[in-house]
Image (cartoon, helix red, strand yellow):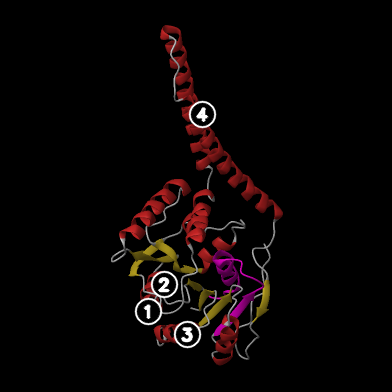
Amino acid sequence: MYLSLVVPCFNEEHGLQRFHDALVAALSERVRDYEVILVDDGSTDRTLREARRLAAANPRFRYVSLSRNFGKEPAMLCGLRHALGDRVALLDADLQHPPELLRRMLPLLDSGYDQVVACRTRSGERRWRSLPARAYYRAARRFTGVRIPDGAGDFRVLSRRAVEAVLSLPEHHRFSKGLFAWIGFDTAYVSFRDAPRRFGRSKWTFGALVDHGLDGLTSFNAKPLRVSLYLGALLACAAGAWIARATAKAIVDGSRMSVCGALLVGVGGLQLCFLGVLGEYSGRSYFEAKRRPHYLVKELSPDVAGYRPRPVERVP
């Protein structure tokens, strides 16, 4: 069975050779027929040059270079569209997703599962990092309506049926962890400990993580809007009770409540919050209505004699 490995890359010029060596060693004598698709997501360093060199030296390696940095989600989508394999693996190029774990994941996929997901354990992680992450995964399970295990990331192996199911979902704002969970199918989980970065720095800034998290919470349903509705109704009832109490107190002893200003400020702040939630959904509808492509391809690796033909780009 043919295996495709999709590897999004952004400014990984110093690590691609190490990744190549580790991946080839992990698959040696275990997977005979495979391809590696390096997706250069508009890198500003010499990642594309390294991808060209690896593709020229090893016919199993191909590359797709995007016209600019579109983000990891479009880069993964691009790799999935170009993957030819009956089985498709997604992993990062920084070796924090250990390629050796594929030796445990692939047999599970071949035993009848459609997805095998690598879940990161939090042993040894500092509490200031693990506690917010656990809280987010709990919130994601509640708001998205799908089961996303704590520590589940993009490192996974998919059957061709699962890949086609993911490719059939055309939305612009993509939260792949949720999409992979939404399609269902039989799923197995493998735990692993996140390896430390051997080179470079993480591309996920705090702001990028917050944006990605909001995408996950709002991409699958309108529960945040419903929460706003419930809170608004609760505040309206509380405000009505407060006004009734203030009126009665003024009639009885002529006193005035001194916290009306604070109440107005609190209600005004919540109204702005609700408007922000509504604006988030309106903005998503605006982008979906445009129907722009998720990415644009700048360069593809040339065909190699005797190698499988490159697939035609599918336009949603």
Give the amino acid type for the residue marked by disc 3 in the picture.
His
For the magenta stretch, what is the residue range?
Answer: 61-85
- Nearer the observer, 173 or 31: 173
Q: Looking at the image, is mark 3 or mark 4 nearer the viewer?
A: 4
Q: Which residue is mark 3?
A: 20
**Residue 310 placement (x, y as % from top left):** 64, 79
Residue 64 forms part of the magenta stretch:
yes
Is 207 one of the magenta-colored residues? no
| In this picture, residue 114 sits left or right of residue 130 | right
Find the distance from the CA under tag 3 to the CA under tag 4. Answer: 60 Å
Q: Earlier in the sequence, mark 2 or mark 1?
A: 1
Q: Position of residue 59 (x, y in %)?
A: 56, 89
Find the distance from the CA under tag 2 to the CA under tag 3: 24 Å
Cα–Cα span, label 1 and label 3: 13 Å
Instruction: Answer with left or right where residue 279 lies relative to residue 182.
Output: right
The residue tagged 4 is 264
Q: CA distance from mark 2 to mark 1?
A: 17 Å
What's the CA distance linking mark 4 and mark 1? Answer: 59 Å
